[in-house]
């Protein structure tokens, strides 16, 4: 039972354009969501998070949007840069799961110069 | 510098041998986790520990074992019972629900 899903395994965009990565979840008890970025042969690094009391959180070029009614969140990167090319993981947690995170499958973003 | 260290970065073992992956953190985090990454399957939880001397099975615990004798250390043993041990293994630690994880740099295990 995949509670967090990233339906697009890969996404390719041109440098300077917007990248939109999507994530859906099924567990209504999730109330905290995070995005991680991962380069090959390295551990993921935290990018941005959002609590369920908000619908948007922005940090520089990165913005995460949360639509609780649709159980959907998205990560917007604008403008996209070649250094953003990586695998992006969506993750979720809830009070019932404590600090345990449930991850999506990841989306490989490629930003072409 | 505070962080989480996994060693070794690359590990080769013959089929049928047990192997232990090291994970050490000096972040004073209570919780620690082991994940496995396979292509197209994201990060799957093997075991986690929220306090010393206690740990719980994750989603794919079969063929693995752990111990948590010290707050700083959470070693993972891949036993010969694990049917597909070749993978990239990630250790993480956390201080609580709303702080996310800090990950190590991973260990690539190849069983031949």
Image (cartoon, coloured by chain):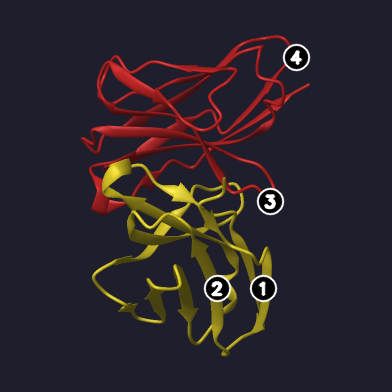
Chain colours: A yellow, B red
Q: Tell me: residue B88, above or below residue B83.
A: below
- Dot label at residue B49: none
| Image mark 2: chain | A
Distance in Å between CA atoms under marks 1 and 3:
14 Å
Secondary-structure class at tag 4: loop
Q: Residue at x 57, y 45 (%)?
A: A1
Position of residue B57 measured from the top left corner of the image (x, y, whole percent):
44, 25
Other residues around mark 3 within 10 Å, as few (<14) / some (14–19) / many (≥20): few
Q: Of label 3 and label 4, which has the lower sequence position?
A: 4
Judge left or right: residue B18 versus residue A90. right
Q: Which residue is mark 1?
A: A11
Verify CB contact (< 8 Å) between mark 2 and mark 4: no
Q: Which residue is mark 2?
A: A21
Name above or below for residue A75 compared with residue A30: below
Which residue, given by chain and number where applicable, does mark 3 sit on?
A: B40
Q: Are marks 2 and 3 on the same chain?
A: no
């Amino acid at each position: 039972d995949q509670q967090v899903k990233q339906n697009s395994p890969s996404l390719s965009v041109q440098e300077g354009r917007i990248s939109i990565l999507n994530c859906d979840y099924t567990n209504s008890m999730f109330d905290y969501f995070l995005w991680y970025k991962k380069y090959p042969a390295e551990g993921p690094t935290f990018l941005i998070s959002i609590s369920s009391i908000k619908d948007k959180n922005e940090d520089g070029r990165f913005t995460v949007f949360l639509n609780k009614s649709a159980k959907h969140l998205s990560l917007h990167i604008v403008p996209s840069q070649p250094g953003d090319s990586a695998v992006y993981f969506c993750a979720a947690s809830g009070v019932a799961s404590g600090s345990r995170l449930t991850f999506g499958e990841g989306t490989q973003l490629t930003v072409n110069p | 510098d505070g962080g989480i260290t996994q060693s070794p970065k690359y590990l080769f073992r013959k089929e049928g041998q047990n192997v232990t992956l090291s994970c050490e953190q000096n972040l004073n985090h209570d919780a620690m986790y082991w994940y496995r990454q396979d292509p197209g399957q994201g990060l799957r939880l093997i075991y986690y520990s929220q306090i010393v001397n206690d740990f719980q099975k994750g989603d794919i615990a079969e063929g693995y074992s752990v111990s948590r004798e010290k707050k700083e250390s959470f070693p993972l043993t891949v036993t010969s019972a694990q049917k597909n041990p070749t993978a990239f293994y990630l250790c993480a630690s956390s201080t609580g629900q709303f702080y996310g994880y800090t990950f190590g740099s991973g260990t690539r295990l190849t069983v031949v």
